[in-house]
Image: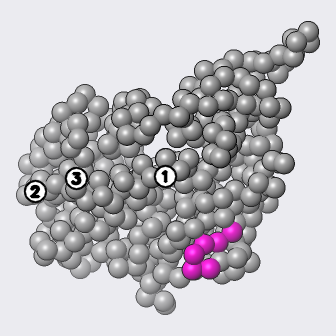
Amino acid sequence: MNKHRVVVGLSGGVDSAVTAYLLKQQGHEVVGIFMKNWEDDDDSEYCSSNIDFVDAAAVADVIGIEIEHVNFAAEYKDRVFAEFLREYQAGRTPNPDVLCNAEIKFKAFLDHAMRLGAEKIATGHYARVRQNPETRLFELLKGLDPSKDQSYFLHRLNQAQLSRAMFPVGELHKTEVRRIAEEIGLPNARKKDSTGICFIGERPFREFLNRYISKEPGPILDDRNRKLGRHVGLSFYTLGQRSGLGIGGVKEKGAARGAGDHAPWFVARKELDRNVLRVVQGHDHPWLLSHALRADQISWVAGHAPAEGKTYGSKTRYRQPDSPALISGATADGFRLDFPEAQWAVTPGQSAVLYDGDVCLGGGIIAQVDPQERGVS
């Protein structure tokens, strides 16, 4: 194996810590960088990067590598957070982790690492990279631990970015990563995995969004045009959402109580022109099921577009098993996917990502779910 000068993104978590350790064990020259991406309320109980930096510095000390603290908050606000707000204000549900990887971790961070003389960068993502010996193109593969695979979040990387990337823990299961951390005495070996979006932390999502997006309340209607209540603003809801709707069951006047009276309600549609939130009862209601979508803002990490008229594995949200999808109508601006099996709560703003077995091909941002395919008249 060639030895490289590798800059590792140390987040304070166990995955990036073990990443740095493994690379040093392999003989690479390893330098750690802690990325500060948010500072609006960094001293709050929800979003404190100070604690994470202390953990990252402690890890660097145990492993025996240097660590640098770098502030990318301005780049993050311009390239990720601004887009996040634009998407929510347009009624869509964006995935900022996808944008953060493409714009910050593998652009701003990569550029900084190159200035430090790095040949490679590494993160604690559960994914893998290999170079195809025939095409010489780099391939992004799923992590070996199916419950932790994060290739979905990396699908917007390009070949230049992928060629510089290393993901050592992608070859391991999470239990093995924890075992290694315990074995070498890392101080964060048992640290809980971070959840949610970095700038929101563990705080209630609506509470955070309230600070940046104005409310425009409107009616909540069901599929029979019955008014069930008032929503606080369409931006605060996502398709498939079940909790936080503030509505109960609905029963026709004089009708006997039936089994469906207490079935859960789900957000099924947002009618932006009328400021109406549509909800339906039951997980398998036709309005929640889709057989087709159109995606734009495409990016093919594989280095080329997939073949037209071919069926691939697909994900329309993270932690979803691959579903067969037929790609068609591909242009430089977008593509269409058709699903033999209906997909649940396909959500504009999320990513539609394609796979050929374990190889992630890339994808796009879901722009439209065909209304005819969703049973909406």
Q: Position of residue 85 (x, y in %)?
A: 42, 49
- Contact (CB < 8 A) between labels 3 and 1? no
Query: Which quadrant holds the N terminus?
Result: bottom left
| Residue 332 is one of the magenta-drawn residues | yes
Tell me the crowding category of disc 1: few under 14, some 14 to 19, or many 20 or more residues within 10 angstroms, Cα based. Answer: some
Kind of residue at disc 2:
Glu
Name the mark nearer the viewer: 3 or 1. 1
Q: State the SS at label 2.
A: strand
Q: Please give the name of the residue rendered at 71% of the width and 51% of the height, measured from the top-left corner.
A: 343
Residue in front for this viewpoint, 128 or 236: 236
* Label 1: element kind: helix
Residue at 69% across, 69% down: 336
Residue carrying label 3: 73
Specify whether 265 is left or right of 138: right
Residue with the mark numbered 1: 87
Q: Which residues are magenta?
A: 331-336
Q: Which residue is mark 2?
A: 68
Up the image or down, 61 lies above or below 3; here it is above
Tell me if residue 372 is in the magenta stretch: no
**Mark in front: 2 vs 3:** 3
Residue plotted at (73% across, 43% down)? 288
Q: Nearer the viewer, mark 2 or mark 1?
A: 1
Task: Name the side, left or right, on which 43 lies relative to 158.
Answer: left
